Image (cartoon, helix red, strand yellow):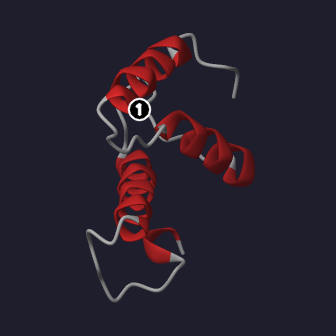
């Protein structure tokens, strides 16, 4: 997976959010790690919207972030939905 040409938007958003001391989850890193590990695409062939696997990767990343902030508890094990 090549570097995204929209990485700058994530960096700008992270910077702005930090000014308000809010948490930020950069999903581009999650998608990159997942693709490198599994070689499974997370977007549809004909556009860049997430497919089912993309939604799973995003949901699990957000779930982990919420758990670290103690804002969400769920009985899933640490492997979560991507087992």
- Horizontal side of 40 relative to 56 (left or right) equals right
In the foreground, 13 or 51:
13
Taking depth in this image into account, of 12 and 64 the one nearest to the observer is 12
Secondary structure of the residue carrying numbered label 1: loop
In this view, the residue in front, 56 or 51, is: 56
Residue 27, visible in the rendered structure: yes
The quarter of the rendered structure image containing the C terminus is bottom right
Where 14 falls versus 68 (above or below)?
A: above
| Image: 75 above or below 29 | below
Residue that appears at 48% across and 41% down: 42
Q: Write the residue at 41% across / 59% down.
A: 65
The percent position of residue 36, horizontal first and vertical second, equals 73, 45
Residue 1 % position (x, y): 69, 29
Decide: is 72 above or below 15: below
Which x, y percent locates residue 20? 29, 32
* Relative depth, front residue between 73 and 54: 73
Residue 73 located left or right of residue 7: left
Mark 1 lies on residue = 44
**Number of marks in picture:** 1
Q: Can the viewer see residue 47 in this picture?
A: no
């Amino acid at each position: 997976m090549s570097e995204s040409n929209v990485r700058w938007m994530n960096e700008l958003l992270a910077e702005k959010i930090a000014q308000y001391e809010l948490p930020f989850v950069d999903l581009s890193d999650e998608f990159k790690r997942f693709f490198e590990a599994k070689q499974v695409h997370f977007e549809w062939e004909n556009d860049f919207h997430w497919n089912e696997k993309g939604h799973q990767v995003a949901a699990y990343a957000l779930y982990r972030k919420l758990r670290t902030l103690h804002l969400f508890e769920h009985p899933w094990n640490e492997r979560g939905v991507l087992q």
